[in-house]
Image: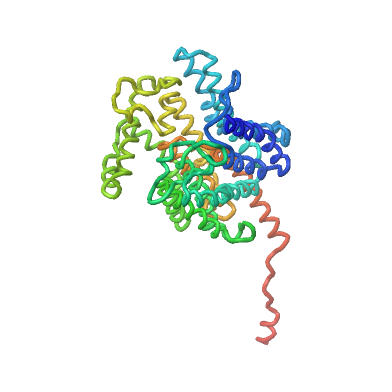
Amino acid sequence: MQGNQFVLAVLFLFLVFGPLIMVTFRGVKGVMATIVFGWLFLPPVRGINLPGLPMFTKEYSVAYALLLGLLISNSAGLMKFRPKLIDLPILVYILAPLPTSITNGLGVYDGMSGAYTNVFLFGVPYLLGRVYIRNPNDVKTAAIWFIFAGLFAVPMALWESQMSPQLNNQIYGYRASPFHMTARLGGYRPMLFMRHGLEVGLWFATSGAVAIWLWITASKQIKIFNLPISVFAAIILVTNILSRSLGAIILLAGTTALGLFVRSTGFRLALIALVLTPSIYLGVRISNIWSPDIILEVIESYDPERASSLRGRVAQEASFSQHALKKPLFGWGGYGRNRPVGVEDRSDRSVDGFTTIIFGVYGFVGLISFLAMTALPSLLMIYRIKGRAITSALWAPAVGIMLGLAIFSIDMMLNSFYTPLHIIGIGIIASVAVQAKQWQRTIALHQKRSQALNPPSAPSHTSSQHNTR
């Protein structure tokens, strides 16, 4: 009981500490610091039931703190914000529980409760990304804080990778997930103060993708603590490997390889293919056009244990998707109604992938709006940044965040560890996509004015004429 009281005290104290960070630092720095410190150090999973509200947990503590900080420190910016068409997908996703609950006979109150959850877990971080990003320097600050998100977690992860995941148990008095799941690849999978070791892996992979892209495209222009980005990219990369989350390691390696390819060739279609990967995969899987059996056989020849795990996930995906297609538009709603009934295989009774979960719960409305929310801002940004500028130092922070979000989007097909760091990232890229044309015009105008004020000196011909005479 004493441990629970400490957990609740920390969660409530962050409602003061979080807004204080935003008031003290202001701007993008304050917002990102609130998210990073809140998610890295607040206790996961546990909370308190509040009358008429969802359980008050880490997710809501961070979200409420962000909203309070926004109202206190930047209410003027909030009033100036005007939604655009690009914001429609997240609005549809937030409201998806309403038609789902009504069509399933669960009532308006149930739908309002689901919408309330979506407002705070998705809407608030996204809104801050839209409100606070006003110029390229804001994006640069945000990208650096994506790197800080990984760096601040490095000491804890290195300690737990050797000593086993003990921090949450030692400080808050409980384990967020079973201990036996932490033994991996000859060591321990760190958990820090998160829900699972897989979430830690995603956290490092996201941070690493931003750091590596800045390293290969803007190492001369962007430094941290007057040190080259390469130092921090290497630290995060090594820690990601030591975190022993194979999926996150593969996603970061694949994204890095694609980034190097785009950097050397300027082939923008590769970025588009990466962003569209979840949509394409889910489209062919739900329609049963393609089966990943061949890929699983290849993986099995190298790692039978990993192949077995992936086969279980594919079976989950197929079973839940078939059940979801019985109510395709608005889904089955909550309370486990999205689970197939009458099956004996335990792997079919639970599902890990977030996209499969929301397809079953909210139907195509929820699934398509979520995929559009994660993909459209990146696609519009790629379209509006012209030519080889996509690999320039100017746009490196935005493209780096986009690559981190691509890892997140693909991981959501396998797991369901979304964080406010990823959701604000979506809002940041949406802001970049909306303002990219204006920024490019401003930069071009500034360059013309600089050339007019400082014209290149004309070569002198006097001496040469004198010599010929």
User: Residue 397: x, y in percent?
Assistant: 57, 50
Camera-side residue: 325 or 183? 183
Task: State the image coordinates of residue 254 (x, y, percent, origin top left).
Answer: 41, 50
- Seen in the picture, residue 71 relative to 439 is either above or below; the reply is above
Count of numbered labels shown in the rendering: 0
Q: Quadrant of residue 24?
A: top right
Instruction: Kindly tell me whether residue 430 is visible in this rendering.
Output: no
318 to the left or right of 262: left
46 shown above or below 342 = below
- Tell me which residue sits at (47%, 50%) in the image: 161
Residue 26 in view? yes
Q: Residue furthest front?
A: 2
Residue sitting at x 61%, y 30%:
5
- Pick the front one: 370 or 51: 51
In the displayed structure, 370 sits above or below 252; it is above
The residue depicted at 44 percent of the width and 28 percent of the height is 358
Image spot of residue 344 (x, y percent): 29, 24
Residue 233 spot, x, y in % from top left: 52, 56
Q: Quadrant of residue 11?
A: top right
Quadrant housing the C terminus: bottom right
Q: Quadrant of the N terminus?
A: top right
